[in-house]
Amino acid sequence: AQRVTQPEKLLSVFKGAPVELKCNYSYSGSPELFWYVQYSRQRLQLLLRHISRESIKGFTADLNKGETSFHLKKPFAQEEDSAMYYCALGATGNQFYFGTGTSLTVIP
Amino acid sequence: ETGVTQTPRHLVMGMTNKKSLKCEQHLGHNAMYWYKQSAKKPLELMFVYNFKEQTENNSVPSRFSPECPNSSHLFLHLHTLQPEDSALYLCASSQDRGTGELFFGEGSRLTVL
């Protein structure tokens, strides 16, 4: 069965500090991994996907198949990064499975 | 109007009522989804429709009945719900064989009394 685990429900960092949001997955096939973000009073939206290997708003995430991880990282956190972050796994048949989410608070 | 629109935004119903949630997307996508978001739980995938055909029913109780009359509209019919069904129901759409990006609506907050 597919599963996405985000071990941290809450994460607080100071502005300018590095931040890492953890995500582990289990999937028997070739995974497609995503990070979604939900800012206060906004809808859930895509932040980045592993296949594009891009950096969005300073965030990056590397797929580590050996450790089955897809951690989200940013070297210098900003106050506007405070939000709810969800890791998601794309499976065959257009099925997407989400973790429980991590609430990030950046302290000024 | 563009994007994914859900109505109603809030719904309160009794356990014997019949109600429906509606989702509409103006993005030209051909895959649509219902997710359930409860406190302290991951987003639960309920149903997936590709080209109006249901391709996934994630062990959802029959008191939830989806309907997809065309690629732009998706309904979730509700009947004899339980209080534990109270949650935020999110609709999303994506382009089949596209980049895999889901576009979400703002959700319908359901309270079952």
Image (tube, coloured by chain):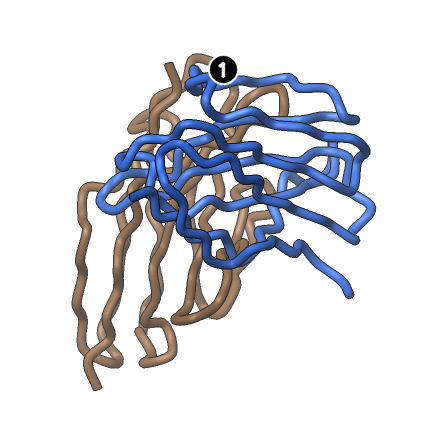
Secondary structure under tag 1 reads loop
Left or right: residue B28 versus residue A27 is: right
Image quadrant assignment for residue A27: top left
Q: Position of residue B59 (x, y in %)?
A: 43, 15
Q: Which chain is drawn using brown?
A: A
Left or right: residue B14 versus residue B99 is: left
- Point out the residue furthest to the front here: B16
Q: Which residue is depicted at the point 79% across and 26% down?
A: B51
Q: Chain of mark 1?
A: A
User: Which corner quadrant holds the N terminus of chain B?
Assistant: bottom right
Q: Position of residue B103 (x, y in %)?
A: 62, 50
How many tags in the picture?
Answer: 1
Q: Which residue is depicted at the point 49% across and 15% down?
A: A29
Residue type at mark 1 is Gly
Between A47 and B75, the one lying in front of the other is B75
Left or right: residue A68 versus residue B40 is: right
Q: Which residue is depicted at the point 19% across and 80% down?
A: A107
User: Which corner quadrant holds the C terminus of chain B?
Assistant: top left
Q: Identify the colour of chain B in the image.
A: blue
Q: Position of residue B91 (x, y in %)?
A: 57, 44
Between B96 and A35, the one lying in front of the other is B96
Q: Which residue is depicted at the point 39% across and 27% down?
A: A65
> Dot 1 corresponds to which residue?
A29
> With respect to residue A78, does A102 lie above or below?
above
Image quadrant assignment for residue A19: bottom left
